[in-house]
Amino acid sequence: MKFNALFAAMLFALTPLPAAAQAFFGNPFSDAATYRSARGALDEARYRVRYEATITEHGGQPVVGEITFDVADDWALVREGDRTTLYDFQLNRVFTIDADSFRGQNAMGNLTFRIMERQNRAYLTQIAQSAGVQANQLPDACDAETELSVVVPGARAGATSFREQRGVFTFTCDDREMGGFTMGEGAAPPRAFWPAMYAEMGTHPALHHRVRETDHAPAQLSTSFRSGAAQPAQRAWRLIAIENVSTPYPLVENLRNVSADALNQLVPGTGQIGVDAVAGRAQGGAPTLQSWDAHLRDISRREGEAAAAMLMAPSFNMFPELQCNSGPRYAICEIAQRLRSIRDPAPMAILEVGMAEQSHNNAAAIAAMTRAQSSPLRDHPALGAAFALAALRFNDAERAQATAAHLPLDIAALQNRALLAYPYNPAYWTDVGDRYGANYEWSSAFMFYDVAYSLPMPSALSGNQSLIARRTQMERIRRDFPEAFLATTP
């Protein structure tokens, strides 16, 4: 299936890199013992830093609290109020820990949201200025970069500078004072402090970078930004204490992973089917190329060749090594050769809808789906999944046309049905993830991406071009936003 166009467009400007071996995606359903084993070393956190945090939202009353970091070399435990968050930079995961359970999230989710939102702010600014709004009436690049803590390579960025006097640094962006910091003292923090600080104490990346260069936790840090309100938002942190502690790795084995419950809240049923598919026990076990070929031949005998032909897209997504020009003659290759001679219009409609979707020809997609309505296979999950991708781009007139033709337009229902019917097809998981990403719900999107990359379908994970592209994009993000990640050791 097609890589999300919005995501691809945003990443186009980022530094091109080859695909890398780093694991950016992981099994979201693993138990604590498995995560601990995957880490190897479970060193204690011996460095604690406590800050008083004062947050003022656009003229409101200041909210004062305390935030505590317990930091090891490659993980950090952050406590603020009732929230306990573990940043595991080796596993690339963020865990929210409760008394008897935890929920894990891909660390790329929140960062991707901020990158995408920064691009969106630039786009909205262009629209406002074209409508005649004066630039000085709008939040500028400095404000967006500070609020979101990202500077996108290639985009128009604020010009930053620092003024220092006796260890007090004043930060300026586009000739506006927007915060600063007082240099700290004492021992240098472990390297996991800096990406944890980046996640929890949001500032302009240039300000974060300058603090990091001192190699000391700051004694004070402050920042401000506008976002359309009359008064700017302000964030300030004052160092309370740096302490020596002995905090063990907090993801202890008696904690229960509730990530499947979170997935179920997004799409009912996907939590359990996801757990079973990743474990290779859904629907009798993960298919191999040979067992899938036998399955298609069985469908062809029992239900007819048209029913087997409906599974062309899942076949090639799960088994990209399929070569129909040479080697063994697989059932799907034989069916593909005879596709145009199959009298049922539904199998051809899947191909036509897919081609129309990729060429942005919505009229052709509607026409193909309309032809398929005469088929007894018109409600097949694979056809619905193909049409859902096209329907995502329909305008009001096209939706009215599809409604008049009695075509299915509940995109979520169409995609969810395909996912539950064919849980070993990684494309159906990424399609649902893309739908959440298009609505800027990137943390939710990455839950579905994690399942896709955890399926026991080795050829799909290594050879599916869409999955390869996503891994490459994650490596680009890591290269272009290093402050969000653990610094590599010399």
Image: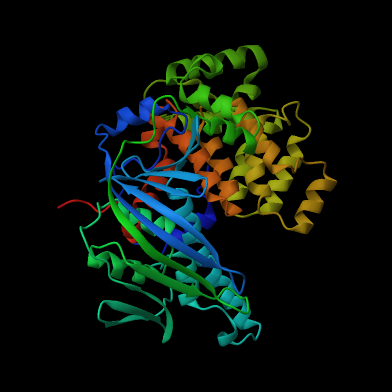
Q: Where residue 295 sits: x, y (%)? A: 54, 16
**Residue positioned most to the right:** 404
For residue 186, side relative to residue 484 (left or right): left
- The answer to which quarter of the image holds residue 135 is bottom right
Q: Where residue 367 sits: x, y (%)? A: 73, 46
Q: Where residue 7 sits: x, y (%)? A: 50, 55
Q: Where residue 186 sits: x, y (%)? A: 21, 61
For residue 472, side relative to residue 366 (left or right): left
State whether residue 316 appears in this view: no
Q: Residue at the spot x=33%, y=81% of the render?
A: 161
Q: In this view, does 335 lie above or below 444?
A: above
State whether residue 156 appears in this view: yes
- The answer to which quarter of the image holds residue 352 is top right
Q: Residue at the spot x=79%, y=32% of the render?
A: 374
**Camera-side residue: 432 or 299?**
432
**Camera-side residue: 363 or 212?**
212
